[in-house]
Amino acid sequence: MSEVVDADELLRRIQRGRERAAEEERACRERAQSLTATDPEGAREAAGRAQAYEAVRCVLDEITRPGGPPPAT
């Protein structure tokens, strides 16, 4: 990333990243639930991915709303 961006553009990029992480977290949780009965290993992997996306989302939330209450997903 060699281009110079202003604060507004940086905030927009962070917000897009947060939205994407929330979408992926939701998709992974749904996948984990659907695989629980048929593929326990796949369900564990999907749950682990959901936790990773949740962590990313939480960090980006803290950047955009420092000290604020956690937003609903």
Image: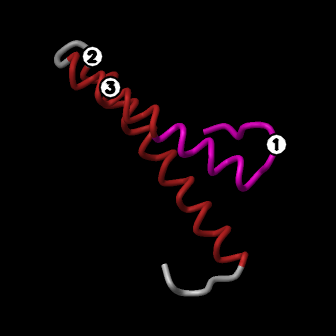
Which mark sits nearer the N-terminus, 3 or 1? 3
- Binning the other alpha carbons within 10 Å of mark 2 as few (below 14), some (14 to 19) or many (20 upward) gives some
Q: Secondary structure at mark 1?
A: loop
Q: Are marks 3 and 2 in contact (CB under 8 Å)?
A: yes
Above or below residue 39? Residue 23 is below
Disc 2 to disc 1: CB gap under 8 Å: no
Q: If the image is split into quadrants, where does the C terminus sit?
A: top right
Q: Is residue 48 above or below residue 40?
A: below
Q: Which residue is located at x 51 percent, y 45 percent?
A: 22
Residue at horizontal 38 percent and vertical 39 percent from the top: 27
Is residue 56 inside the magenta stretch? yes
Q: Tell me if 14 is positioned left or right of 48 in this view.
A: right
- In this view of the protein, which residue sits in the foreground, 4 or 42? 4
- Residue furthest left as drawn: 38
Between marks 3 and 2, how big is the CA–CA gap? 6 Å
Of mark 2 and mark 1, the one earlier in the sequence is: 2
**Numbered disc in front, either 3 or 1:** 1
Q: Which residues are magenta?
A: 53-73
- Amino acid carrying label 3: it is Ala
For disc 2, the marked residue is: 36
Q: Is residue 36 magenta?
A: no
Residue on which disc 3 sits: 32
User: What is the x, y in percent for residue 6?
Assistant: 69, 82
Q: Residue at x 34, y 22 (%)?
A: 33
**21 over 71 or under it: above or below:** below
Q: Secondary structure at mark 2?
A: loop
Q: Secondary structure at mark 3?
A: helix
- Where residue 50 sits: x, y (%)? 42, 34
Q: The residue under label 1 is which amino acid type?
A: Gly
Give the residue number, with chain letter if any, for mark 1: 68
